Image: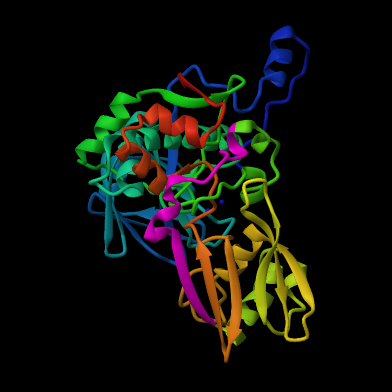
Amino acid sequence: SSVAVSGLAHCESYSPKEENQKTTHPLAIPNHDVHIRVRVGRFRNDQQAVINGGRIRAIDGELQTTNTIKELFDKSDSTLFVSRQPGQFTIGIGEKQKVVTGDIHIHARSDIGRSDFDIVAHVPIEQYLPGVLAGELYAHWHPDTFAAQAVAARSYAIVQHLNRLKSSHFDVTDGPSSQMFLGDVSLEVAHNATKETEGVILAWDSTVVPAYYSACCGGRAASALDAISGSSQHEILPLKGRTGSDVCAHLDVASWRATRSSRLFRKRLNASAKQLKLPELESIRSVRSIEPCEHNKHGRPTKLIIKDRRRNGFVVHAKDFVSAANASVSSLPLPRDPVWSSTLSCSKSGNDLTFEGRGLGHGVGLCQYGAQELAGMNKSWEDILHWYYPKASIQAI
């Protein structure tokens, strides 16, 4: 859940100030207001967008609009339109609409295709968050769950902004590959949680914590190094997982079951080998069973072994296996049942594979169902954050 725009300026001469800038940590806590650049529209293969009733499309790499759009946007060049002033925009994508208040940038994406473009909203972070909370949590959940989620989502979005500011025209998308963003919302508990935690982030050693979260950890924590990537930004205590079983472990939602055709599943693994750069999956010709073969210190699988009918074993990182199992392959139908997490085992019966697993998502950081359980036990949002991000400090920007 993701275009080069510019690079770091070249320094012609030395000065102490420039040396300080070079050594500043990329995730240093910002001392200014942050506007999140969220991609709210992704238009490909000659799709058209509707903004406040006006139509826009890309033809041969150039943006073409109706007069209504021309009244609202300045044309920086043929590949970039920018709204003349912040305002409320209704953006139509097919039959769906999203209302967003902010600055709107429309980027032609000739690097992808001559008829492709993105719509990116630049939204002040405190204005952005209610739309995230409304998309990530059930409306009836506890206010402290919302407040804990607000701090995590704010921290995550700021990290994405700091990491991508020099390399991309957007920080986050509005779907599950980043964090859900519904645009302008009226959900009172979401606005209250944003206001109560205004400017509050999770910090570690004067940097912002990449505060990942998932729906349900299934009781066992993952580390960001294992479940997200080997980035040095993940080598911090708050992202190594809390110790002990989580309060979500007894919930019905913590367990799942999936059934897949063995033949189609093997084909999906083979097809995703090049797509995901996992050559170990290309030579698999049958699947008999899948079991964990390596765990982290919390008991969550980090590697899985796939055994074929001859009992040959193929070892794969757990996060890569989940990506391959759910990969979209043009020659195959979409998976019937998702593989929800890496905490799983699988056996073959007849022509089918039966998966049994625990947890929904990668299991790093805040567990949303667990946070709701803790809030129901009268734990404050600060207590919830200290549980899921050990040793992190709670600070205001």
Q: Is residue 137 above or below residue 61?
A: above
In this figure, what is the number of numbered marks? 0
Across and down, in percent, residue 357 comes to: 52, 65
- Residue 239 is covered by the magenta coloring: yes
Give 170 or 283, whichever is nearer the viewer: 283
Residue range in magenta is 238-260
Q: Residue at x 65, y 60 (%)?
A: 318
Q: Quadrant of the C terminus?
A: top left
The quarter holding residue 325 reads bottom right
- Residue 351 is covered by the magenta coloring: no
Kindly tell me whether residue 397 is visible in this rendering. Answer: no
Across and down, in percent, residue 352 comes to: 55, 86
Across and down, in percent, residue 102 comes to: 32, 36
Q: Residue furthest top?
A: 16
Q: Residue at x 54, y 53 (%)?
A: 362
Give 64 or 391, whichever is nearer the viewer: 391
Q: Is residue 369 above or below residue 10?
A: below
**Residue 262 horizontal side relative to residue 145, left or right:** right
Kindly tell me whether residue 349 is visible in this rendering. Answer: yes
Q: Is residue 212 above or below residue 324?
A: above
Q: Residue furthest bottom?
A: 350
**Residue 315 horizontal side relative to residue 378, left or right:** right
Q: Residue at x 35, y 36 (%)?
A: 129
**Residue 54 horizontal side relative to residue 108, left or right:** left
Q: How is the image coloured?
A: rainbow
**Residue 243 horizontal side relative to residue 94, left or right:** right
Across and down, in percent, residue 333 comes to: 50, 81
